[in-house]
Image: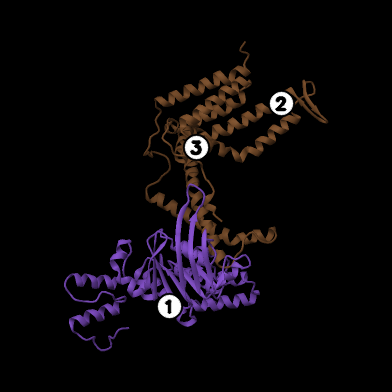
Chain colours: A purple, B brown
Amino acid sequence: MIRIVDVHHTYLAGTPMATEALRGISLEIPDGQRLGLIGPTGSGKSTLVQTFNALIRPTRGRVEVDGVDIFAPEVQQRRIRQRVALLFQYPEYQLFEETVLEDVAFGPRNLGLPPDEARARAAEALRLVGLDPAVFGPRSPFALSGGEMRRVALAGVLAMEPQTLILDEPTAGLDPQGKAELLDLVEALHRRRGLTLVLITHNMDEVARLTERVVVLAAGQVVMDGPTREVFARADELVALDLDIPQPAQVLRGLRRRGLAVRVDALTVAEARDEILRVLGTPPAPGEEAR
Amino acid sequence: MALRAVPIGQYLPRDSVVHRLDPRTKILATTVLTVAVFLVGTFLGYALFAAVVAGLILVSRIPPRTVLAGLRPVLFLLLLTVLLNLLFGGTTGSRVLLRVGPVVLTVEAVTRAVFVGLRLLLLVVVTSLFTYTTSPMELTDGMERLLRPFRRVGIPGHELAMMMSIALRFIPTLLEEAERIMKAQMARGAEFGRGNLVQRARALLPILVPLFVSAFRRADELALAMEARGYRGGEGRTRMRELRFGARDLVAAVVTAMVVLLVALPGRVAWR
């Protein structure tokens, strides 16, 4: 479990360029939760998640992972980063080794595992992201497609065998098919391994699909926190923050404005379809039940 | 580690006459003044020179404190030079001022030490005044124009200026990128600044390889973007801001010439 208490962070503190990125954030993320972190650009999302694994030391406040203060002097921050993995935006630009397998094994090697074991873990991680280690393992990471590179980067953090996986805009710059595949992958990882997920994204359909709880940041503070459906039900507040709502909800709101008495809190296309059919009084056709 | 905190280029935008000068004027004046610093031969000359520089700082609206803070990096060099000149600057024939054990201070050495100290100080202040008041863009523009006459002898002024402005433009970008990559590798358990020299150097590979890859990618994209917008080198290229000499540039030139005549020459030339 990740627990942060009254975390503040100021970049370039003490200089004329000082900017306050986080202003007193407290949050608890229980094990196995799927959390969406949204907010306008510059609201502090990326800064916040970097405090979770000690990449950024907040200027004030406490960060605990499984009850341990991660900035206590006796704590090895490498151990924390093993438990709380963070995949940065455009992670394909962090690849550097000669082969895919060696690159994925970089994390396990840093954890002090013997080379054989590190490679075994790397192969396992590659399988997890749907890349055959026998085919992709010996190839150069620079000879892969963009989507494949991103999967390799994801494998690179999964090979650390973390408990929590933080994804910062994981689908940015991918084509629609690549996006869908990556989301399926993340969902499967959560289901099979019980990983805690923290997803930062601007795409509300991804949030609606993947998360059960949403935290909205604005100007370095938490302005909303609740179950995904409830947060998206506060559409006007989200729009006021320059944020979107999931597309199915947008469609339903449009229908409602034009006089169709539908509920507007659908999160997925299937839910929206069923709601429209319900209001129109037509039962779903056989074999077309909500997925 | 906040790599972004490294100050790159110390341009301080202000609304002042010095800022508005044509960059060519400032380049030439700075060159002339730095040469003049070495020509000054009397204390009176230095006093006058310092007064002119102080005046320039006032006119340019750069806070004097900023100028002083800018001196900090050269302070050690300054003190060392003064000290060395103090101790070893005199010749055997000159008048002894003070003798403490083996240390001998001669009049000549003290004079020379003070001169050298003042020279260094003025040199740094004059050149930093130039960088405080001239944006990198103006600097490269001015350089390009000044180098134009030398194209006949094969000096590619435009290309040099373009390379310089691109390099300046990308320094902060690459620093930011380096920090990002570093954090990404730390998230995979990498640690920097540990172990012996070889281990430390090896630990840099996971940063340097991605950094080079991305620098080349950026260079490629930039070249394409420039071509897409019709860039064909400097030939026939028009500018958004044309450099034009104005009345204030004439004033600056006169002031510079006067400084040289009044301050620098009397010490050198037999004026009697």
Q: Residue at x 83, y 30 (%)?
A: B101
What amino acid is at disc 1? Glu
What amino acid is at disc 2? Val
Q: Residue at x 24, y 73 (%)?
A: A252
Subunit of mark 2?
B
Judged from this view, the residue extending furthest toward the top is: B272
A285 shown above or below A177:
below
Residue indicated by mark 2 = B110
> Which is more N-terminal, label 3 or label 2?
2
Subunit of mark 3?
B
Q: Position of residue B246 (x, y in %)?
A: 39, 27
Q: Position of residue A210 (x, y in %)?
A: 39, 75
Neighbours of disc 3 within 10 Å: few (<14), some (14-19), many (20+)? many
Residue indicated by mark 1 = A187
Question: Which quadrant of the figure contains the C terminus of chain A?
Answer: bottom left
Query: How far apart are the alpha carbons under marks 3 and 1?
Result: 54 Å
Q: Position of residue B133 (x, y in %)?
A: 47, 35
Instruction: Give the quadrant of residue B209.
Output: bottom right
Label ID, residue B132: 3
Q: Check if mark 2 and mark 1 are on a common chain.
A: no
Q: Secondary structure at mark 1?
A: helix
B199 shown above or below A67:
above
Q: Is residue A88 visible?
A: no
B51 shown above or below A166:
above
Q: Is residue A159 visible?
A: yes
In-front residue for pair A197/A228? A228
Q: Check if mark 3 and mark 1 are on a common chain.
A: no
Query: How far apart are the alpha carbons under marks 2 and 1?
Result: 78 Å
Q: Tell me: A215 left or right of B262.
A: left
Q: Position of residue B46 (x, y in %)?
A: 60, 23
Neighbours of disc 1 within 10 Å: few (<14), some (14-19), many (20+)? some
